Amino acid sequence: MAATSRPRTTGVRQFLDPEQQRDWIAGKIELPDVGERPESLEQRFKYVARFEKLLNRPQAGELLEIVGLYGPNCIPMIRKTERYYWSVSCLPSTLDKPLVRVNASWMELFTLYAHGDDIRARFIVHLSDFTIDGSATPSQVDEHFLEQSVAMPEHVSYFFPRGANIFGINVQSSLSIRTFLTSRRVLAAIRTFNLTHMNRGRNAYQASHCYSVADYMQAE
């Protein structure tokens, strides 16, 4: 009798079972992590000049505080999964001119931009987590909830990227970004989306990972 092959386990499913993932999304548990980060010195030095350039920007202080809030709250097992399941780029050379961008698999998760001397953020999440009825119907976006999740209603806007059940949220000002990240519903939605893509396999953006920015994401 031929042996039956088992489906290959991909992404962070190798480290976290479905119950652990659900409990982390709900904020019920803290996930175990490694003590020391696996690191490539060659990769670290590759982006030192870009990081130093970022530090000279007027937004640097606020930006590093925001990534320090986003990292441990929104990425599971942040040390163990660094670079290979998520990565952060510093001043990536794309047309929208971001300051930093966090990716997993082939998907953008979180991006910070200059907004005058302040910053603005773009979050990519599941549309169904931000609708009134839990559907992926654009007309059902819960605008009232979005406006309540920031410091001032005019600080939030949204758009619909290409793809099923994909939703983009723009948040202006470091104050509103912090406020947004303290909402339990928002945090659960971000964690759900991030896990979805971290479970899809290895990160496609490993080569652009900036350890210097990641240091601040891990409070180092």
Image: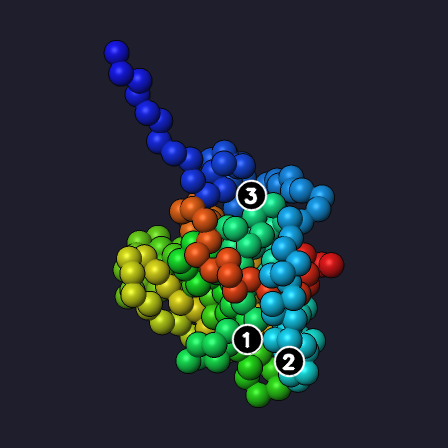
Question: Which residue has dot 1 on it?
Answer: 91
SS for callout 3 = helix
Q: Residue at x 60, y 45 (%)?
A: 80
Distance between the alpha carbons at the discs numbered 2 and 3 = 35 Å
Q: Residue at x 33, y 68 (%)?
A: 160
Question: Which residue has dot 3 on it?
Answer: 24
Callout 1–callout 2 Cβ contact below 8 Å: yes
In-image side of 94 versus 1 (left or right): right
Residue closer to the observer: 136 or 38: 38
- Location of the N terminus (image quadrant): top left
Label 1 crowd bin: few (<14), some (14–19), many (20+), radius 10 Å: some
Where residue 88 sits: x, y (%)?
Answer: 55, 63
Q: Residue furthest bottom?
A: 116
Which numbered disc, 3 or 1, marks the residue that appears first in the sequence?
3
Where residue 133 sits: x, y (%)?
Answer: 33, 54
Which numbered disc, 1 or 2, marks the residue that appears first in the sequence?
2
Question: Which residue has dot 2 on it?
Answer: 53
Q: Nearer the viewer, mark 3 or mark 1?
A: 1
Residue closer to the observer: 164 or 213: 213
In-image side of 70 versus 101 (left or right): right
SS for callout 2 = helix
Badge 1 amino acid = Leu
Which numbered disc, 2 or 3, marks the residue that appears first in the sequence?
3
